[in-house]
Image (tube, grey):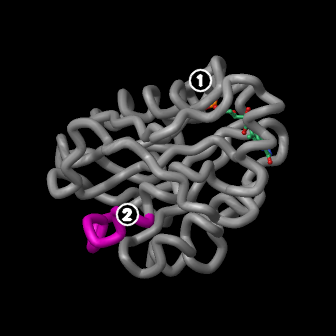
Amino acid sequence: MLGLMAGCSPEAATAAEPVAVAKGKVAVVYFSWSPDGNTRFAAETIAKKAGAALFEIKAEKPYASDFRACCDEAKPECNGKTLRPIQPVAGLDLAQYDVVFVGTPNWWGTMAPPVRTWLTQNLAALKGKTVCLFQTHGGGGMQRVGREFAEVVGDAATVLPPKAFAGASVKSNVEALDAFVAARIAVR
Ligand SMILES: Cc1cc2nc3c(=O)[nH]c(=O)nc-3n(C[C@H](O)[C@H](O)[C@H](O)COP(=O)(O)O)c2cc1C
């Protein structure tokens, strides 16, 4: 049911009831680029609420540190759904986890390319697990991020309803991050 709801309308749906998960079986995997670390903050907060292990995805070659240069660099990759090479995610063994939250900034309306790469590379390891996307954005909201995340995951995993958080206010919105977790999982 949860999977069906998520599949029907990933942007609007909310989980009927939280998925029960054992303590220690939740991971949060994220990519973050800006010095503000909006997605990093969301990931850290979600991990704290869920009692989850936290892992960072890093591009093999870092993006330009200048905003405009980064936008120019990322645009063709985002539009072309390019799988930008990433570093091995330090310490992550997906076999240890049942639920995986995946965080990305909204880049050009979709997920940041390193997140697409990580997902694509780990579809087999995510088989049978439950995954849930969260993203931070600069005003565009969810755009195509949730839909494309669900498309990449396909039927490899159960996809819970994703959520978008405004980057500018995410750090003053811990309650919303906590509520996002509480609506999706019940850690026992
Ligand atoms: C390359 C690039 C593209 C972006 N594209 C969008 C966009 O299409 N829509 C949007 O709302 N915000 C966009 N943003 C803004 C980020 O999504 C937003 O600032 C986010 O919170 C940054 O997260 P971070 O601090 O974890 O990197 C873009 C930012 C960058 C650097």
Q: Are marks 2 and 1 in contact (CB under 8 Å)?
A: no
Point out the image quarter for the N terminus: bottom left
Residue beneath label 1, please? 37
Residue at point 43%, 40% (across, down): 57
Classify 10 Å Cα crowding around label 2: few (below 14), some (14-19), many (20 and above). Answer: few
- Three-letter amino acid code at disc 1? Gly
Label 2 to label 1, Cα distance in Å? 24 Å
Residue 94, image quadrant: bottom left
In the drawing, does residue 69 fall left or right of residue 94? right
For label 1, being within 8 Å of ligand 1 is answered yes
Q: Position of residue 170 (x, y in %)?
A: 65, 27
- Magenta stretch: give its range: 120-130
What secondary structure is found at the residue carrying circle 1? loop
Residue at point 61%, 45% (across, down): 135
Q: Which mark is residue 121?
A: 2
Of 115 and 76, the residue lying toward us: 76
In the drawing, does residue 26 fall left or right of residue 30? left
- Three-letter amino acid code at disc 2? Gln
Q: Position of residue 42 (x, y in %)?
A: 53, 31
